[in-house]
Amino acid sequence: MKAIKITTDNEIKVVTVPEPTWKGMGQLVGGHFEHVRPWGLYNLDTPYKKSLCMIVNEEGRLIGLEHNLVGTALYNNTPTPLGFEPIVGDILIMTEGFVNGEPDIVGLDDEQVKVLIESMSQWLQDNGFEEASKAIDCKFEL
């Protein structure tokens, strides 16, 4: 199962979520996780944007994780996140779907990854995150 990981150092790359999924997501974000719906992802130019979700460390602010500037901008749909909810720690971009007929968090397929990476790259460039946008290109491997 694939996800897009955005670190506090603005490194953006495609990762494989280890099984079992709930444990793998926790490992990738550094602890207990929370599922949130980021407004910024809903404005990306993708056909499935309404099913996108962000996986964040549930206790990140309590344990003092570093600020994730790109994650905060995507969560709040603004490149200047002053006065908005901060996102801290490494995050995952995944999608909501169904597993065995039940709602669940599922991975991104190759086409979703490709379209999302292209759309995120454009959004980052348009909103002053040129360094993060450049980092996508060198980390994009399926």
Image (cartoon, grey):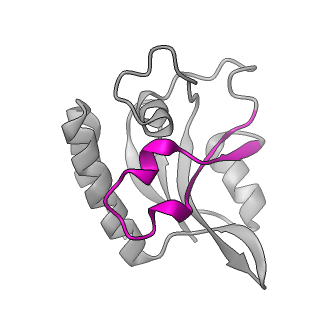
| Quarter of the image where one finds residue 22 | bottom right
Q: Which residue is drawn at 36% across and 61% down?
A: 116
Left-right relation of 13 to 84: left
Give the left or right position of residue 105, taking residue 13 as reference.
Answer: right
- The residue closer to the viewer here, 139 or 78, is 78
Q: Magenta span has 45?
A: yes
Give the image quarter of residue 110: bottom left
The percent coordinates of residue 31 (x first, y second) are 74, 40
What residue is rendered at 56% in x and 24% in y? 86
Specify whether residue 82 is painted magenta. no
> Which stretch is magenta?
33-58
Question: Could you tell whether 1 is left or right of 112 in the image?
Answer: right
Vertical order, 16 against 124 (above or below) = below
Using the image as rendered, state which of residue 42 and residue 111 is in the foreground: 42
Position in image of residue 119 (x %, y %): 29, 56
Q: Residue at x 49, y 49 (%)?
A: 5
Q: Where is residue 57 in the image (x, y as percent from the top left)?
A: 68, 37
Q: Position of residue 40 (x, y in %)?
A: 43, 43
Instruction: For the C terminus, give its image quadrant.
Output: bottom left
Asked whether the viewer can see residue 135, the reply is no
Residue 125, placed above or below residue 43: above
Residue at 43% across / 22% down in the picture? 81
User: Visible in this render: residue 104?
Assistant: yes
